[in-house]
């Protein structure tokens, strides 16, 4: 078994869609970034890559590569899951915390955990999603952006799953 941790943060940007965990959140200001700026999936990908002993998402999907401009983070996560499976591992579970004043993560829990569990190929109950605020402190507390932290556990995949 291997453990990995990931972190990501993006500032808000008017004129962009807000996508968290692969789910578009209507009526909210989006996040700035080269891809769709999905902080939940970006933190999750870095956690998976770290557990596998790989370099970060910036190495695998560089922000100066036009191929990845505006790309869906769901597509990138699918690639990372394929990479991990190719190395003989599978995601066992994921624990994700989103730090923001809004939107309320508890309102999005079911939709995001369903989406992520499908991509990861694990049971919905194996994806934990929590939201927290910083009670007005720091850039998330001032509603300047959103941050996310993820921890994953990888385990060796059985040969027929590779």
Image: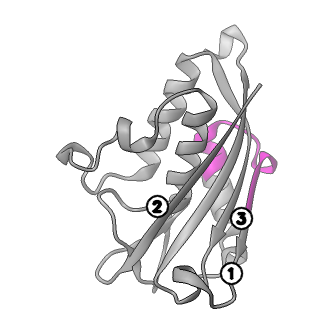
Check whether the beta carbons of the residues at disc 1 and disc 3 lie within 8 A of each other: no
Determine the secondary structure under disc 1.
loop
Q: Going by the image, does 29 lie left or right of 117?
A: left
Residue at 62% of width from left, 87% of height from top? 137
Residue assigned mark 2: 38
Q: CA distance from mark 1 to mark 2?
A: 18 Å
| Residue in the foreground of this view, choosing between 99 and 85 | 99
Residue 86 % position (x, y): 53, 17
| Residues rendered magenta in the picture | 116-129
Q: Quadrant of the C terminus?
A: top right
| Residue 54 appears anywhere in the view | yes
Residue at 69% of width from left, 88% of height from top? 135
Determine the secondary structure under disc 2.
loop
| Residue in the foreground of this view, choosing between 111 and 139 | 139
Q: Which of the two marks, 1 or 3, is nearer to us in this view?
A: 1
Residue at 70% of width from left, 72% of height from top? 131
Q: Find out whether residue 152 is within the magenta segment.
A: no
Q: Going by the image, does 5 lie left or right of 78?
A: right
């Amino acid at each position: 078994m291997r453990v990995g941790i990931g972190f990501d943060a993006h500032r808000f940007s008017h004129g962009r869609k807000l996508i968290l965990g692969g789910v578009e959140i209507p009526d909210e200001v989006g996040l700035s970034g080269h891809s769709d700026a999905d902080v939940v999936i970006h933190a999750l990908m870095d956690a998976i890559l770290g557990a596998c002993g790989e370099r970060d998402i910036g190495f695998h999907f560089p922000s100066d590569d036009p191929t990845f401009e505006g790309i869906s983070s769901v597509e990138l996560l699918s690639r990372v899951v394929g990479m991990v499976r190719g190395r003989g591992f599978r995601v066992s579970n994921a624990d994700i915390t989103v730090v923001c004043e809004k939107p309320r993560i508890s309102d999005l829990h079911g939709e995001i955990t369903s989406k992520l569990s499908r991509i990861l190929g694990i049971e919905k109950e194996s994806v934990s999603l929590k939201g927290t605020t910083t009670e007005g402190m720091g850039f998330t507390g001032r509603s300047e952006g959103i941050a996310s932290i993820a921890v994953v556990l990888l385990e060796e995949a059985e040969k027929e799953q590779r």
